Image (cartoon, grey):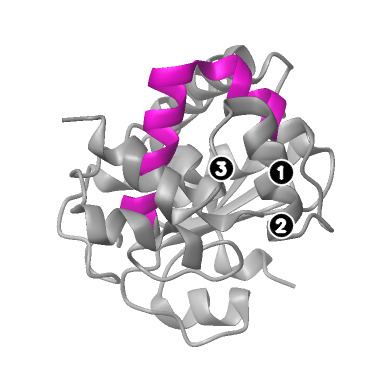
Amino acid sequence: MIDHFFKLQDVKDIKKLNSFLKKSQKELSHFFGTEIYFPSVFFINSRKQYDDVWKMKSKNWMVGGADGRNIFILNPEVYTKESSHKNQSDFWLVLKHEYCHIAIKQFYKQENNKPKWLNEGLCCYLANQIKKTPAKKEALKVFGYYLKADWQIYTVGYFWTKLLIEKFGKKKLLQLLKGINYYTTEKEFGEMFYKQYKIHYTKKDFSELFNNLS
């Protein structure tokens, strides 16, 4: 049981939280074209509790996660104390990011986070977690982030997701997402990607796409 870890009533500004979630729900529902679930939010009060919930030894920058309709996130009252995050306002960006994961899963209609760069990149984009433009060498690491992830995935994923939406439109991206499922291989994803964008899912074509930005 996890009830003793999380006490919603301990958070001072419940009205602000509910208002933020309702606004986020409206924005995400508009983006995906379907009514997105309203989430349950559980607050974690220490790093140890965070590790207990996710059954892992977490990195200090890890502050939240989503499971089904539930968001688990460090209590805003201990957010900077129990993590490496120094800006209290980051809490709201992370909360929106985790809500985006719920929205994406609902859009998929199944448990799926592939490709991971697109999944994390879209969450960063929709949560307005603006990342600096990576160098070309860093941006092309995207092909290493289909199944695995590290701290760089957020910058790389955000860059390519933002480019795809702003250059080619939201519709193409949503059509791409509709074809992906838990069993989609990277090769199959590449074929789907080419069908939508007429761009090969290769370093060569992505390199040219990057060069055309300047």
Q: Is residue 77 in sight in this rendering?
A: no
Amino acid, disc 3: His
Dominant secondary-structure state across the stretch colored magenta: helix
Please report whichever mark, 3 or 1, sits nearer to the chain's N-terminal start: 1
Residue labelled with disc 3? 200
Residue 164 coordinates in the image, percent (x, y): 45, 29
Tag 3 or tag 2, which sits nearer the N-term?
Answer: 2
User: Going by the image, does 56 lie left or right of 3?
Assistant: left
Q: Tell me the distance, in whole angstroms, between the alpha carbons under discs 1 and 2.
A: 6 Å
| Residue 133 vs residue 21, the one in the foreground | 133
- Mark 3 residue crowding within 10 angstroms, few (<14) / some (14–19) / many (20+): some
Element type at mark 1: helix
Please state, as top left, top right, bottom left or bottom right, where the N terminus lies in the image: bottom right
Q: Which mark is residue 187?
A: 2
Q: Nearer the viewer, residue 103 or 192?
A: 192
Query: Which residue matches tag 1?
Result: 191
Per the rendered image, the range of residues in magenta is: 154-176
Q: Look at the image and tell me whether residue 164 can be seen.
A: yes
Amino acid type, callout 1: Glu
How many C-alpha atoms fall within 10 Å of the one at disc 1: few (<14), some, or many (≥20)? some
Cα separation between marks 2 and 3: 11 Å
Residue depicted at 84% across the width and 38% down the height = 109
Q: Name the residue furthest bottom.
A: 57
Q: Position of residue 185 (x, y in %)?
A: 76, 60
Q: Residue at x 29, y 40 (%)?
A: 210
Q: Residue at x 60, y 12 (%)?
A: 30
* Cβ atoms under marks 1 and 2 closer than 8 Å: yes
